Image (cartoon, rainbow, N blue to C red):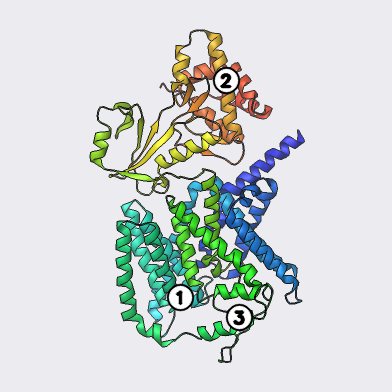
Amino acid sequence: MQLSGFNSVSNRVFDFICLWILPVGYFLLLCALFFLPGRSLHHKLFYGLFSIPALIALCLRPREFKELLREPIFVAVLVFAAWALVSLCWGPENKSIGQFKPPLHTLLLFAGCYLLVRYRSEIVQPLLFSASMVALIGTAYYLCLFARVYEPGLRLIGGGAFDNPLLSSHIFGFFCAYWLSLSMTCKCRKVLWLSIPAMVIMFAAVLETGSRTPLVALTLASLWLSFICWGRRSVVLLGALLISGATVTVLFSQMIIERGDSYRFEIWQLALNKIADHPWIGHGYNADLAIDPGVGTNFQEPHSFVLGVLYYVGILGLLPWLFFQAWGLLSSWRHRVQPLFIIASTWLVFGIGAGLTEGGGIISRPKEHWFLLWIPLALIAALSINQRAKRLLAMPVKSLKSTVMHTMTANAQVIEEDGLGPKVLRLVDGSFLKLFRRRRWYTSGNFNPYSERFAVNSEQLRNLGIPTPQILDLYRLDDGSSAVHYSPLPGNTLRQVLQGITAPAVRQALVERFGKFMAQLHEQGVYFRSLHLGNVLVLEDGEFGLIDVADMRIYPSSLSLSLRQRNLRHMQRYTVDKRWLFEDHFEALLQGYAMMASKSAVDNLHRQVLAGSSPARTH
């Protein structure tokens, strides 16, 4: 009993971390620099709301670590971090326990992103959008303040935790790359018309910082986007890139030229001379670096991430560093059907471009340089793991013109409809077309259309051994609605089967089997909001299957008692379902449920039904 109680508590803690703490922590990691007074608080928020919770989650459920170890990107990062720690052996003597923290927190960023994408994949795009909106509002405010005090030669720094125009430009460029990616991947015109001016505002902020490196990085990001999203928008993007490049050259040529090379070539040459002393193993992860290009000032970074890696951990450290970036881009190209891969890879390309002439610290606490490498790379790794496990959409969404739609649905049988028109159609070839009408432009359906949820949920349920319809195609209609084309499961709904049974003993046995099936769903964490006898099929082999699965979520652990109660309340709303399940054959339902569920869950079901007095409705 004590062990069962401990497991229940640990499951609830794990669920709370994955479903609520990690999303909040990730959101603040992305945008908190815009309103926090300093970086130290940003570090503490990351540690308290993301890094440490991810560590606790892994301790509660160590098996989650296995999937991380199957991901080449994470393995390469792990090797890189391990080699960096090994290099302490030949580095300076000033070793302390604090030097182990940055690699650990970097690895926990990958672990937290994996858990976030696995258990809250539907919230990732809204999170990125919300963080980018915070960045957009903050940047617009900074630009307004900057315009009031502007003088020739003055460079924009920004507010919040920003204290350096070069570092600020990395963040502005990061979010400019996001809006640029969104303009290439979004299907909603209103979101498109928002992303274009948002991109212009972020780009203006980059220009006002006076930094040139982000301009090169954004150019590379634009070229990557036009390549990975090739189509009509790519042509527009390339044209806009040429126009903006010419405009920047004409209007800001003095800013670009007058500062020369900022001693980059001298710094790089001196850094290479130091690298030559220990080319294979480097000087050690904790080594100090001081480079004076002849101006009387020591630079603490070689102003190149590649040179930084070579200086600290040598060629042996550079190999995994190059590998995880190359593999990240390759994985993104392979899975470019998923918009999140496009966004994350664009960030990575932006970071690669920015890292050509900036940076040098290989592993650090959370700061602006994380936006150039670790944040996009961790997201790509998390997406790759979950894409391989078939938890994310892997099917392209096709455009369905009204003329093609009319031809496809000619002579189709309307199975279900509402005030907006047909919802489910049986086509002449026996397949089904389910339509999801667009209602409001600001709903979550813009980020995760219900047709795509239907497809992803179907795949995940099949992975759990639960039969669902086979998805044939996904469509996007001219009016913004979406549709899913699927092959129906061979069988009848449980409601139809129970209606056709005249022998009470046979009906009782079927209800008992359904009770076991419902407990199986609950124990596997499947919360099917629309669970009722019309959405459960009795297949030809006697097994149960599920249909209409768009309104569903799979939780990290077995369902809590409150979620089970909500499932029961939904079924009690239907008059026929309520009579068969909770009146005539309630004991059989309990017996079946007890085969898979704990005694506390069975007792809870019993209490819920006895206390349930909500009015039922006819089907």
Could one spot residue 500 in this view of the protein?
yes
Who is closer to the viewer here, 163 or 374? Answer: 374
Q: Residue 342, which numbered label?
A: none
Give the residue type that dot 1 points to: Thr
Left or right of residue 333, residue 403 in this image = left
- Earlier in the chain: of badge 3 and badge 1, it is 1
Give the residue type that dot 2 points to: Arg
* Residue occupying the far left of the picture: 403
Q: Position of residue 386 (x, y in %)?
A: 54, 47
Locate residue 534: give its quadrant: top left
**Disc 3 to disc 1, C-alpha distance:** 18 Å
The secondary element bearing badge 1 is classed as helix
Q: Nearer the viewer, mark 1 or mark 2?
A: 1
Q: Position of residue 442 (x, y in %)?
A: 38, 49
| For residue 612, above or below residue 528 | above
Could one spot residue 131 in this view of the protein?
no
Q: Which residue is mark 2?
A: 513
| For residue 456, above or below residue 287 | above
Q: Residue 300, which numbered label?
A: 3
Q: Which residue is mark 1?
A: 213
The secondary element bearing badge 2 is classed as helix
Locate residue 251: give its quadrant: bottom left
Give the residue type that dot 3 points to: Gln
Locate residue 240: give its quadrant: bottom left
